[in-house]
Image (cartoon, rainbow, N blue to C red):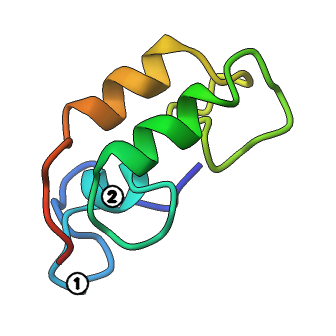
Amino acid sequence: GYNTSPTLVDTDGDGCPDGREIASVDGNHGVNSTDLLLIAQQFGRADRPVQDINKSGIVNSSDLLLAAQNFGSSAC
């Protein structure tokens, strides 16, 4: 769903790892409390593709966990 390569850490070659770009739902490439709050506010929603990090069709704790794994990662 993200057009990334499973064999590359940085598919688009911009210097920022794919996981961090995906987990940063506010688009600043850093993962912080704002991103976690934006995800938590949408729990149970199926119409929030940005916050549905794992593309399961609904925003849930798995999405929050994926973002938390990158928490504290500064912007690239």
- Identify the residue position indicated by label 2 in the image: 5
Q: Position of residue 41 (x, y in %)?
A: 65, 30
Q: Nearer the viewer, residue 11 or 39?
A: 39
Q: Determine which quarter of the picture holds residue 70.
A: top left
Q: Which residue is at a point 48% across and 13% down the rendered structure image?
A: 61
Q: Nearer the viewer, mark 2 or mark 1?
A: 1
Q: Position of residue 6 (x, y in %)?
A: 28, 48
Q: Position of residue 58 (x, y in %)?
A: 72, 21
Question: Vertically, is 15 above or below 69?
Answer: below
Secondary element under disc 2, as helix, strand or loop, is loop
Q: What distance separates the C-alpha of mark 2 from that of mark 1?
A: 11 Å
Q: Which residue is at a point 50% across and 37% down the rendered structure image?
A: 37
Q: The disc labelled 1 sits on which kind of residue?
A: Gly
Q: Earlier in the sequence, mark 2 or mark 1?
A: 2
- Categorize mark 1 by other alpha carbons within 10 Å: few (<14), some (14-19), many (20+): few
Q: Report the number of numbered marks.
A: 2
Q: Nearer the viewer, residue 45 or 55?
A: 45
- Identify the residue position indicated by label 1 in the image: 13
Q: Which residue is at a point 29% across and 50% down the rendered structure image?
A: 32
Q: Determine which quarter of the picture holds residue 67.
A: top left
Residue 71 visible, this angle? yes
